[in-house]
Image: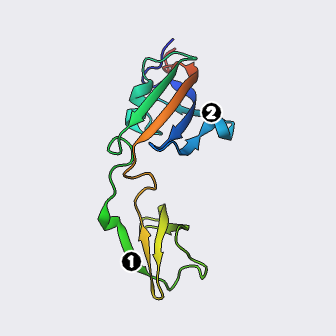
Amino acid sequence: MNVEENDKVSIEYVGRLDDGQIFDSTVEAGQPLTFQVGSGTVLPDFEKALLGLGEGQEKKIKLSADQAYGQIQEHLIQKVPRKGLPENVKEGMMLIAQTDQEKQIPVNVVKVGDDSVTVDLNHPLSGKDLNFEVKVLKIEKNQSPSE
């Protein structure tokens, strides 16, 4: 039995940057990732790389920045007034911003000045190639309503 579109799969993985730094790991967390293939839960090219794998199979997957979270977009690095931000705001801090549509997004503080703060709205993994070591733990075939 191999992974196909619409299957529910459970996988474990370790995600590393090119320098070897781990950015995410279900192994360290002790809990596999379970999702339906094709649901858009994970990166599309990550899903495609899983197709055809069987239970117990392992694979190394490399996604370029363009296949993952895209390149850094300079227009998403902005200066904002310091007023209204936490008193203890400092470089490297992650804040949560709310859009006009009430969606919450993580914001990285790049620079703190007296009157303004420079923030980066890019995804933290933008501009980075991602390397995964993946193991398929379980495959559940999609059951159509007529079955």
Specify the farthest residue to the front.
19
Which mark is drawn over residue 108? none
- Residue 139 x, y percent position in the rendering: 56, 20
**Quadrant location of residue 33?**
top right
Picture residue at 52% right of the left edge, 30% below the top:
133
Image position of 32 (left or right of 62)? right
Q: Amino acid at mark 1?
A: Lys
Using the image, determine if residue 22 lies above or below residue 96: above
The residue most toward the right is 30
Q: Which residue is mark 2?
A: 32
Q: Residue at x 46, y 27 (%)?
A: 60
Does the CB distance between marks 1 and 2 fall below 8 Å? no
Q: Earlier in the sequence, mark 1 or mark 2?
A: 2
Three-letter residue code for mark 2:
Pro
| Coordinates of residue 17 in the picture (x, y in percent) | 47, 44
Residue denoted by label 1: 79
In percent of width and height, residue 1 lies at 51, 11
Q: Dot 1, crowdedness within 10 Å: few (<14), some or many (≥20)?
A: some
**Count of labels in the image:** 2
Q: How many neighbours does mark 2 have within 10 angstroms: few (below 14), some (14-19), or many (20 or more)?
A: some
Judge by depth and name the residue closer to the eye, 65 or 54: 65
